């Protein structure tokens, strides 16, 4: 009976996801009829050439990016909350996002400090993702080294937060010596964006995303055992150190690639796992992992539609919309003063 209930949940959420996917493509400064979208995506021709260009080159990649980012961040948030047994842990607690931000800051703001090679304009569309990936990898390496030197999982959380503070301090110093145009460029990147990816960039994104998701599905048993403590996990034959490193690597991989291509997008990874637990009333990761993935994709699609301000030429920062959604959820969870883990 319980499995049947979950099946109904997943069917409903999957249908809602598909509907919102097409709604996301339809809405914007120019509203495009659903029939035209389906014709274009299925290889047909649109009645207007401009609509076809908008759908294939802008809105379809943006909608796919929203699904990948929303589901990826939500899964990372679930992994971190399970590993640290902390309801306020999210995908960015390891400092990976801060490392990516530092890489972008050095590229954009560094010319005022370092000059020379960095004084030139951004070389290509790949410059920001590459810089962000290098920054994320640097912090990831430091966190993994630290994780292998400490036994207490909570110490890793503190170390990650410290790395985040350190990178933020460096970015502040770079900002102080930078020009207004450079600061503005970095600020716009920090707002987050779902609509800047070409199909080539999106292909790289999808490949790395799939590697992270497949790896996540392979550690469901360790994740469930972590809920009852490390001692219980050891009694089941779980290699704590190995499984912990795998969880850290998966989270870092997904968070790093998402931040590299879309910028730091707040609150999705923090709020969605709690919503999913409340809806499904389970702590079984076999249910939670696909649940948070679908919920995350749905919520970010909704946030993106709101950010587009349908029929308006203006677009709000996606980070602002996700924060407006996420912050009240986290506050509500704290005020309830109930267990957030089922």
Image (tube, rainbow, N blue to C red):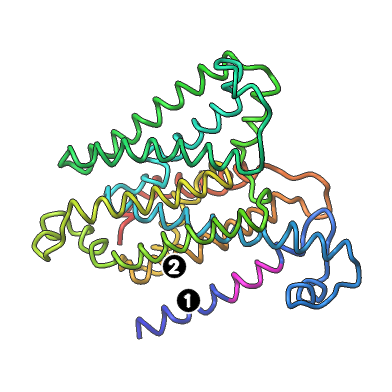
Secondary element at image label 2: helix
Q: Quadrant of residue 12?
A: bottom right
- Element on which disc 1 rests: helix
**Residue at position x 67%, y 25% in the image:** 120
Q: Mark 1 points at which residue?
A: 9
- Sequence-wise, the earlier of marks 1 and 2 is 1
Q: Quadrant of residue 109?
A: top right
Seen in the picture, residue 74 relative to 152 is either above or below; the reply is below
Q: Which residue is drawn at 60% across and 72% down?
A: 16
Q: Which residue is drawn at 67% across and 30% down?
A: 185
Q: Is residue 65 magenta?
A: no
Per the rendered image, the range of residues in magenta is 15-22
* Classed neighbour count for the residue bearing mark 1: other residues with Cα under 10 Å, few (<14), some (14–19), many (≥20): some
Is residue 128 or residue 61 the one in the foreground? 128
Q: Residue 277 location in percent, x, y?
A: 39, 63
Helix, strand or loop: magenta stretch: helix
Q: Which of 103 and 302 is in front in this view?
A: 103
Q: Residues within 10 Å of mark 2 (few under 14, many from 20)?
A: many
Q: How far apart are marks 1 and 2 (CA)?
A: 9 Å
> What residue is shown at x 59% (from left), y 69% (from top)?
17
In the displayed image of the protein, which residue is found farthest to the right? 48
- Asked if marks 1 and 2 touch (Cβ < 8 Å), the reply is yes
**In the visual, does 17 lie left or right of 332?**
right
As drawn, the label of residue 291 is 2
Image quarter where the N terminus lies is: bottom left
Q: Where is residue 177 in the image (x, y as percent from the top left)?
A: 58, 13
Using the image as rendered, state which of residue 176 and residue 249 is in the foreground.
Answer: 249
Compared to 255, does 190 lie above or below? above
Q: Give the percent coordinates (x, y) of residue 164.
A: 40, 31
Say whether residue 267 is left or right of residue 282.
Answer: right
Q: Where is residue 331 in the image (x, y as percent from the top left)?
A: 45, 44
């Amino acid at each position: 009976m319980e499995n049947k209930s979950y099946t109904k949940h997943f069917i409903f959420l999957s249908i809602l996801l598909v509907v919102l996917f097409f709604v996301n493509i339809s809405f914007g400064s120019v509203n495009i009829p659903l029939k035209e979208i389906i014709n274009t995506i299925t290889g047909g021709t649109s009645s207007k050439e401009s609509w076809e260009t908008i759908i294939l080159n802008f809105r379809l990649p943006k909608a796919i990016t929203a699904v990948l980012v929303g589901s990826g961040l939500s899964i990372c948030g679930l992994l971190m909350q399970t590993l640290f047994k902390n309801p306020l842990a999210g995908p960015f607690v390891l400092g990976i996002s801060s490392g990516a931000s530092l890489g972008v800051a050095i590229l954009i703001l560094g010319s005022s400090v370092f000059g020379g090679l960095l004084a030139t304009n951004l070389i290509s569309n790949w410059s920001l993702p590459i810089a962000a990936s290098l920054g994320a990898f640097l912090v990831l390496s430091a966190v993994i080294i630290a994780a292998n030197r400490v036994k207490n999982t909570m110490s890793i959380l503190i170390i990650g937060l410290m790395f985040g503070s350190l990178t933020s301090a460096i970015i502040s110093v770079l900002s102080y010596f930078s020009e207004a145009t450079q600061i503005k460029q970095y600020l716009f990147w920090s707002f987050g964006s779902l609509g800047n990816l070409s199909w080539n960039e999106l292909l790289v994104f999808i490949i790395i995303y799939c590697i992270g998701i497949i790896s996540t599905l392979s550690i469901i048993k360790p994740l469930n055992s972590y809920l009852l403590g490390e001692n219980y996990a050891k009694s089941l034959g779980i290699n704590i150190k190995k499984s912990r490193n795998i969880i850290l690597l998966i989270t870092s991989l997904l968070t790093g690639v998402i931040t590299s291509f879309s910028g730091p997008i707040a609150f999705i990874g923090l709020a969605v796992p709690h919503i999913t637990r409340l809806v499904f009333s389970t702590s079984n990761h076999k249910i939670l992992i696909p649940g948070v993935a679908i919920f995350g994709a749905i919520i970010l699609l909704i946030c993106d539609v709101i950010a587009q301000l349908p029929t308006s030429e203006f677009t709000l920062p996606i980070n602002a919309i996700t924060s407006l959604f996420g912050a009240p959820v986290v506050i509500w969870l704290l005020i309830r003063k109930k267990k957030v883990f089922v």
